[in-house]
Amino acid sequence: MTKETRASKDLSARGRKLTGYAAVFGQSASIGGEFTESIEPGAFRAALASNPDILALVDHDSGKVLARTRSGTLRLEEDAHGLRYEIDLPETTLGRDLIALAERGDLGGVSFGFTVPEGGDAWAGSHRTLSAVNLFEISIVQASRPIPARLSRHGQGRSAALLPGA
């Protein structure tokens, strides 16, 4: 399975918390200019129920852990709008820096890392609909990137291979 990332600019700071939506349901987005994609309600349900330890990272860097669901410092919820997150930032230099950057509006947004399980997507021409994903992390992204993000570096340059018949 190819590791993929998608991003959103929905990020706000409230005290020592970062909150927003990492994904919004039913919105079509261009992925690397090669195909469009939308996420169906329920796509995160199984992952949230079965993965007891989803991480909150900075820039998808496993060396920069901000929070995790196992400790309760990351809360994820799928509601009618999308995948909502709430991160309790640590009292560390990194945590303080992120709060300052968020309050100034200097962060790029939030992204989530996932794979698609067998049967978790459906293609109609060059449009992919995600109905299930294996979610393993969300990340606060510092640099502004085109939203939604392209495939991660693990899959970059291979997104055409995701197209049916490629």
Image (cartoon, rainbow, N blue to C red):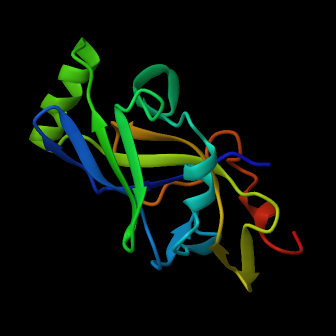
Name which quarter of the figure residue 89 lies in: top left
Residue at the image position 23 percent from the left and 29 percent from the top: 98
Q: Nearer the viewer, residue 40 or 1?
A: 40
Residue 154 x/y as whole percent: 70, 39
Query: Residue 139 is drawn in which quadrant?
Result: top left
Indicate the quadrant containing the C terminus: top left, top right, bottom left or bottom right. bottom right
Question: In screen coordinates, is 67 left or right of 126?
Answer: left
Query: Along the horizontal axis of the image, is 111 left or right of 133?
Result: left
Query: What percent of the width, then of the height, locates residue 66?
Result: 37, 26
Looking at the picture, does residue 68 appear above or below residue 44?
A: above
The image shows a total of numbered marks equal to 0
| Residue occupying image coordinates x 52% and y 37% | 54
Whether residue 58 appears in this view of the structure is no
- In the picture, measured across the screen, residue 89 lies left or right of residue 15, that is right
Front one among 142 and 138? 138
Residue most toward the right?
A: 165
Residue 144, compared with residue 147, is above or below; it is: above
Residue 31: image location, x then y, percent: 57, 65
Query: Which residue is rendered at x = 63% and y = 57% of the image?
Result: 46
Q: Quadrant of residue 95?
A: top left
Q: Residue furthest top?
A: 93
The spot of residue 110 in percent (x, y) is: 37, 47
Q: Residue at x 48, y 30 (%)?
A: 70
Note whether residue 127 is visible: yes
